[in-house]
Image (cartoon, grey):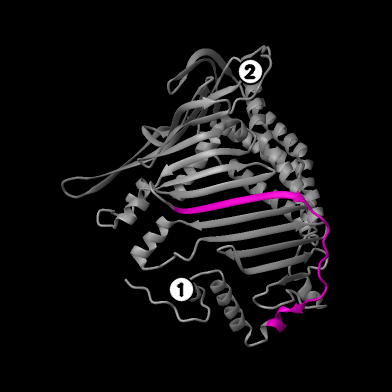
Amino acid sequence: MKKLFSILLAVVMMFTMFALSSCNSEPTFKTPEERYEYVVNKEVNAISNPVLTQYSKAVESANNKKTTAQIGVEVGSGLKNVLKTMLSIDLDSLNSLDLKLEATVGSKKSAESATLLVNKTEVASIDAFTESETGKMIAKIPLLYDGFISMHNGDDQEKTTMINIPDFKKLIDALPTKDEINALISKYVGIFLSKTKSVSVEDVDYTVGSLSEKAKSIKTTYSAADLGALVKEVLEKLKADESIKGIITRISTVVTPETPNSAYEAFVQKLDDTILIFDDIDEEAIADNKVDVELLTNNKNELLGFVLKVTTKDTVIDRTTDEAENMSSEITETLVTTALSAGYLETKDKYAFNVSAVRGEETLFKADSEGTKNNDCITGKVNVTASGKTQTFDIKDLDVKAMKNGEFSGEISMSISGIVSGFVSLDLMPDEVKDLANSTLIIKGKATSEAVDMSVELKGAKESYLTITFKAGFTAAGDFTVPTDSVPMEEVLSDPDVINNASDKLIAKLKESGLSEDLVALLSSLLGVGVEPVKVEN
C-alpha cells in the first residue's frame, strides 16, 4: 500500500510539473542555446514559485498564529461486521474517534493542547506550555493530576535547561526568505546553463495518448566528464557562498547558541568529502557515459514534456560451466541507457499525460492517463505499472491549476482488490471479507495554505468500512499567559496510587462514552490498564 501511494504521489507531482503557465507573447531567440536557457529557467520558476509561496505562507502562519487540527475516525458497519465475523469483536458501540489539536506559537513561549474523544465524549486531554528562555515545560494531564505538572525541577538550572527550546520567533526570523531561496536557485541554475555547449531545435508533431500538438524539440547532450566538472564547480561555489553561510549560521545561532558555527563547519566538511570523490573519478572509464536531454515546448515556449536519457557503462559477468564442471567467467562491459520521459497535453475539453522509466529493454515504471477536462479540472483514469503489476486510479474533478499553485482539490480513488489478492486467497473467506477486499479507497477534499479539509474513506458497494477525516486551519493568535503554579513530575509520580487512579479514570470515561462493557475491557487490556481482558473466541 505504501509503495502504491508513493507511486500515486509521483503521478500527482507530474501534473504539477506540467501545469501550463501563461505567456502573453513569444520572445525572440538569436540562438538555440538562448531558447533552451529560457525554457529551463521558465520551468524552474513554474515549479519553484508555488513551492516557495507555500513555504512563505507556512512560515508566516507559524509566527503568532494559532493552528487548529482535528483528525476523525468513523467505523462503518462494514468493518464492524468483518471484525465480528473474523475475530468475534463487537464494535457496534464504537461510532467515532476524534483527536483535536491546537498549537499557538508566541515570541518566547508556546501553548499546545490535545484532546481525545470517543463517540464525541472527551476521555483524555493534555494542555502544555513551554518557555524558550528558561526551558520551562509544564502540562496539565487530568487523568494524572488536577493541576499543572512541571517537566523540569523548579530552580534546578541543570534540569531546567536539559531540553533546549529555541526562541520560536527568532527561529522563524532566521529561516531563509523566499527571495533568498529564489536568488540561490537562479544562481546555481545559471551555472548549470552556462555549461551547455550545443543545442539543436526542430519542429515536430508531439503526441501524448490520443492528443497531438505541433511542438519544438530542443535537444542537448552533457558528457559525464562535463557533468563531473560542473558538480565539482558547484560544490566549490557552495563552499564560498556567503549567502548560504549566512543562512546556516543564523539558524544555528538560534538553535545551538553555544556552538553557532558548528553546523556550517560540518556542512563545509561534507562538501570537501564530496569533492574528493569527484577528484578520484577516472575520466577514461566514464568517457562513453552521457546525459541526453530533450525538451518539448509549444508555441508559447511552455514545457509540454521531456525525455532524459542517461547512458552508463555496466559490467556484466557471465559465468559458465563446461562438461567437466569447470567454471569460467567472462567479463564484458556494455552501455546501458536509462530513459525517463513525461508529457502532458490538453485541449479545451480533454487531457492526456504519460510518464515512464525504462532501463535498456526493461520498463521500470509507467503511468498514463486520459480523460475529460472542464475548466481547470480533469476527470479520468490513471494506469500505473511497476514491478510488472498494474494499478488503476480514478481521478475526479482534480484541479490542475490548484496543483500548480501547490494546493490540492479533487478526488482520487482506487480499488484495493488487486493489493489484497496479492497477499491472501479470498476463495475460502466469508462474504464480509470478500466485500471488504473489493472495496474502494477514496481520497478527496481540499488543501490550501489557509485550510485543509480532507478525507480518506474505505467504501464498499453497499456500505462504508472506515472514514478518516483531517481538518486544519490557521487564525491570528491572541496573547496567552503561561501558568506559574505547578508540581514537579517526580512528586506526582511518587504517589503509589497515581497510575491506578489514572486507569480507573480512563475506564470510567470510556464507559461514559457509551462503549459496551466488553469493548471497554478489550481496550483496557490492550492499553495495559486495570481490568481483566475480554476473552476472544477463535
Can residue 293 be seen at all in this image of the molecule?
A: no
Q: Report the front residue among 387 and 269.
A: 387
**Cα distance between the residues tagged 1 and 2:** 68 Å
Q: In the drawing, what numbered circle is on residue 35?
A: 2
Residue 220 drawn above or below residue 422:
above
Q: Residue at x 61, y 79 (%)?
A: 502
Is 8 inside the magenta-drawn segment? no
Q: Residue at x 69, y 34 (%)?
A: 49
Name the quadrant of the C terminus. bottom left
Going by the numbered disc 2, the residue's amino acid type is Arg
Which x, y percent locates residue 170? 82, 53
Toward the bottom, the furthest residue is 496
Asked if labels 2 and 1 touch by Cβ distance under 8 angstroms, the answer is no
Residue 170 drawn above or below residue 124:
above
Going by the numbered disc 1, the residue's amino acid type is Leu
Can residue 407 be seen at all in this image of the molecule?
A: yes
Q: In the drawing, what numbered circle is on residue 522?
A: 1
Residue 260 drawn above or below residue 337:
below
Q: Tell me: 4 left or right of 321.
A: right
Looking at the rendering, the stretch of residues picked out in magenta corresponds to 465-492
Is 470 inside the magenta-drawn segment? yes
* Residue 84 sits in quarter: bottom left
